[in-house]
Image (cartoon, helix red, strand yellow):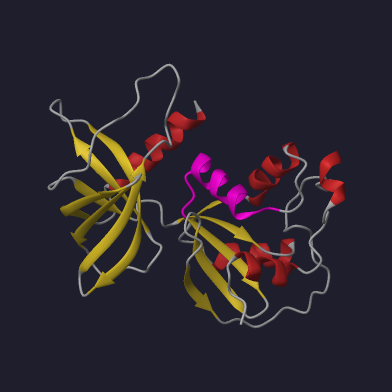
Amino acid sequence: MKTLLLLLCMTASIFAIDTSKVLTTETKDETTIVTAQAPTLKVGEEAYIVRKLQDGTSIIGFHCLLKSQQDTLATFYCEKFDGISQEAMPKINFQAQVGDTLVLNPMKKRALIITTSQNKYLKLRDYFKEYNLVHPDLFAASLYEESNPLPTRHDFQNFCKQYYVATLIFDLADGIKTANCQSFEILQTFRKKSLDEHKQMKPFFHRLDTITPGFWNWFGATEIEDFHTYYKELLNDVN
């Protein structure tokens, strides 16, 4: 039921965003490369290839990430979309072709905030009030179930696929950085006034119990030593 409701939300959001048409297609290994005319985007932003069926309905066939753009000609690398796959239902399977609809950034405003305290979370929630925010408790719960106090890119990407989150908002010492959840490309950096708070909630602000490592995790790192360093390294944003 959760997947169905999220899919309905995603479908509804498509009507409010930009679309384009696939101009060329090329296949390399498991990746489909398409080009399209698109407004100025940022490398790492998302798109979906949608095919309209004869009965008037549409299906999503590919999830794409922007790899390069020259003027308004954008190049996307696409993979088969499996976000709504169910064992009891037939798999969506079509090859991208010229003329398919490319839906640009349909979930850009659906975001997850990663910060160190409730006070900072509330301030960021107000600052990003135009976003549809997913509470960090949900991400913490997924880490809690896996006994994993050290979230990786893979953990973020799986969570974002499950809850249709496109944007991560990291509250770091040198600024607030937004990143695409699948590519981890930094999209924007906002300078800020630092709040004088020394206590860092690990691995980020949430309202659940402490996330303790599983048995096998005790042989490696079991806690984030420094919040800002950890997430800057996750973003490959180390100078």
Q: Quadrant of the C terminus?
A: bottom right
Q: Is residue 91 magenta?
A: no
Horizontal side, residue 99 vs residue 181: left or right: left
The segment highlighted magenta reads 151-166
Q: Is residue 214 visible?
A: no
Q: Is residue 80 depicted above or below 39 in this figure? A: above
Horizontal side, residue 218 vs residue 14: left or right: right
Labels in figure, total? 0
Which secondary structure class fits the magenta region best?
helix
Percent position of residue 122, x then y: 65, 63
Return the residue nearer the eye: 212 or 176.
Answer: 212
Percent position of residue 6, x then y: 45, 37
Percent position of residue 224, x then y: 79, 61
The residue at 44%/32% (across/down) is: 5
Q: Is residue 163 magenta?
A: yes
Q: Is residue 162 depicted above or below 223 in this figure? A: above
Return the residue nearer the eye: 26 or 233.
Answer: 26
